Image (spheres, rainbow, N blue to C red):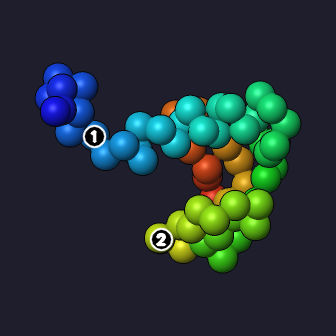
Amino acid sequence: MRNRSITDVFEPGSTVKPMVVMTALQRGIVNEKYRAEHGALTESTVHEIKRRGALQRIDPHRGFTEVE
């Protein structure tokens, strides 16, 4: 049984990502200059589908931003 008022509005991964980044920052797992390269995080089994190269900054509104 699904509660349609709280499901299917956004993809779950898209809404969870900011919370994951916030938690990782608070626990000291990553910092503002954390780099996830080659589409994979070395500390876990999560893989990025769109490879974007080196990402440097974490912005709470935009997520990881590219190195300028």
Left or right, 32 with reference to 6: right
Where on the picture, by quarter, is residue 37? bottom right
Q: Which mark is residue 50?
A: 2
Left or right, 45 with reference to 10: right
In the rendered image, residue 51, in percent from the top left (x then y), is placed at 54, 73
Disc 1 designates what residue? 10
State the residue at coordinates (76%, 67%). Answer: 42
User: What is the count of numbered marks?
Assistant: 2
Judge depth for marks 2 and 1 and give the one in front. 1
Q: Nearer the viewer, residue 68 or 9?
A: 9
Above or below, 44 relative to 24: below
Where on the picture, by quarter, is residue 8? top left
How many residues crowd around disc 2 within 10 Å: few (fewer than 14), some, or many (20 or more)?
few
**Amino acid residing under circle 1:** Phe
Residue 25 shows in this picture: yes
State the residue at coordinates (54%, 66%). Answer: 48
Q: Nearer the viewer, residue 17 or 56?
A: 17
In the rendered image, residue 46, in percent from the top left (x then y), is placed at 59, 62
Q: Earlier in the sequence, mark 2 or mark 1?
A: 1
Q: In the picture, which quadrant includes the N terminus?
A: top left
Q: Are marks 2 and 1 in contact (CB under 8 Å)?
A: no
In the rendered image, residue 5, in percent from the top left (x then y), is placed at 17, 23
Where on the picture, by quarter, is residue 7? top left
**Amino acid residing under circle 2:** Lys
Residue 67 shows in this picture: no
Above or below, 8 relative to 4: below
Separation of marks 2 and 1 at Cα, in angstroms: 19 Å
Q: Secondary structure at mark 2?
A: loop
State the residue at coordinates (60%, 72%). Answer: 39
Q: In the picture, which quadrant includes the C terminus?
A: bottom right
Q: Secondary structure at mark 1?
A: loop
